[in-house]
Amino acid sequence: MSTADLGLAKLVGADAVGQPGQRRFRLFVLGQSPALSAVMWLEKEQLNNLSLALDRVLAQLSEGRILRTEAQAGPPPLPLEMPATFPKRPDYEFQIGRLLLNYEENRDLLVLIAVPMEIRMEARGQDPRIFLLEEDALSFLFTLEQAHELTRSIAVLVSSGRPVCPLCHTPLDGGPHACVKQNGHREIVQVLEEGDEEEEE
């Protein structure tokens, strides 16, 4: 797999565009040398999985110290928004089909490889097919500190949208929910936060 390399990231973050229920999620990266920029669109589940993967790696590398620090660090930060100075026309922009996360021990850096995807209609009447564009993959390096801030920011970003069903991961809008994992036979009850006036009957 050939990749374009942004080198060590000067800036790496994640944000969302649009209103809850219609949000589109993206990673944005600005390289230090060369100073190339990239915007990579991805699904909410992909973003959440990236956060979980980063958490696991950070916990392993720090033997749990990062998680203990996180528990004592107080409320998490607000999601990092794309800076106004970020290039309006990035050098690379694509929809992510696959993410690969590695650790370079000799430099104590993480490397993320993003493989673009393309949806094609092969023939009339057939369902569209997804193709991974391995030859157009993009990679960049980032520090453990940047990874820590990124995963904390993603956690806030993901949780700030609509709650999802814990079984089928369909967004819940407060009304009745027919869960496909339970064939719609059981009602999914949203747990109310303390201080809410409503109570379960």
Image (spheres, grey):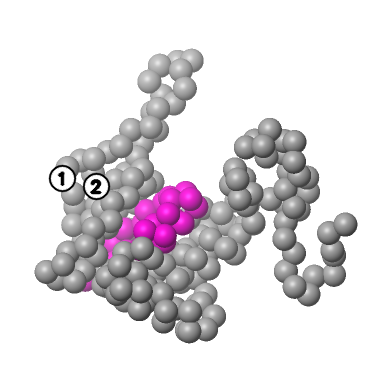
Picture residue at 17% right of the left edge, 64% below the top: 104
- State which tag comes first along the sequence, 1 or 2: 1
- The picture quadrant where one finds residue 2 is top left
Mark 2, Cα crowd under 10 Å, few <14 / some 14-19 / many 20+, is: many
Q: Position of residue 187 (x, y in %)?
A: 76, 44
Task: Count numbered badges in the picture.
Answer: 2
In the rendering, which numbered label is found on residue 137? 2
- Identified by mark 1, the residue type is Ser
Say left or right for 156 vs 190: left
Q: Residue furthest right?
A: 201
Picture residue at 32% right of the left edge, 50% below the top: 99
- Identified by mark 2, the residue type is Ala
Q: Secondary structure at mark 2?
A: strand
Magenta segment: 26-54
Circle 1 residue: 2
Q: Secondary structure at mark 1?
A: loop
Mark 1–mark 2 CB contact (< 8 Å): yes
Q: Position of residue 166 (x, y in %)?
A: 61, 50
Q: Quadrant of the N terminus?
A: top left
Q: Position of residue 21 (x, y in %)?
A: 63, 52
Can residue 178 be seen at all in this image of the molecule?
yes
